[in-house]
Amino acid sequence: MQNLLLHTAARRGLRIRRDGFASLPDVLALLNCPEAAVEQIVASSVKHVAPRFELAQQVFPGWIRATGRHKGLIEQRVSVYAAQLQ
């Protein structure tokens, strides 16, 4: 999941918002896994007291992003992806 969100999103057609979030249903489809599995990964992926992923499910359709130490890389990837769309 981390590889998809940080490295292969553009190549695989996954749209990443400027804040680093991707549509949860799109991520689930690309990973071919159920939402419960992603929720388990998110809940168990705490590294150095900070979560590796963040879910925003209160907003439809649900969003997910990699967080913490990857923030700078996310912003860099989003900039590259935005440039590719233009």
Image (spheres, rainbow, N blue to C red):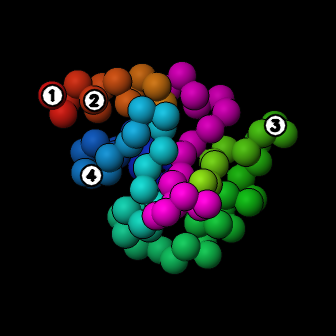
Question: Which amino acid type corresponds to the residue marked 3 in the rendered image?
Answer: His
**Residue placed under numbered mark 2 in the picture:** 82
Q: Residue furthest front?
A: 59
The reply to whether callout 4 and callout 1 are in contact (CB within 8 Å) is no
Q: Distance between the residues labelled 2 and 4?
A: 15 Å
Q: Which of marks 3 and 1 is nearer the N terminus?
A: 3
Question: Which amino acid type corresponds to the residue marked 2 in the rendered image?
Answer: Ala
- The question of residue 60 being in magenta is answered with yes
Q: How far apart are marks 3 and 1 (CA)?
A: 37 Å
Question: Which amino acid type corresponds to the residue marked 4 in the rendered image?
Answer: Arg
Q: Position of residue 63 (x, y in %)?
A: 51, 54
Q: Earlier in the sequence, mark 4 or mark 3?
A: 4
Location of residue 7 with respect to 63 vertically, above or below: above
Q: Distance between the residues labelled 2 and 3?
A: 31 Å
- Local packing at callout 1 (Cα closer than 10 Å; few below 14, some 14-19, many 20+) is few
Give the secondary structure at mark 4.
Answer: loop
Q: Position of residue 67 (x, y in %)?
A: 62, 38
Q: How far apart are marks 1 and 2 (CA)?
A: 7 Å
**Residue placed under numbered mark 3 in the picture:** 48
> Between tags 2 and 3, which lies in front?
2
Give the secondary structure at mark 2.
Answer: helix
Q: Which of marks 2 and 4 is nearer the N terminus?
A: 4
Q: Quick one: 61 or 13, which is closer to the camera? A: 61
Quarter of the image where one finds residue 56: bottom right
Q: How far apart are marks 4 and 1 (CA)?
A: 17 Å
**Residue placed under numbered mark 4 in the picture:** 12
Give the secondary structure at mark 1.
Answer: loop
**Residue placed under numbered mark 1 in the picture:** 86
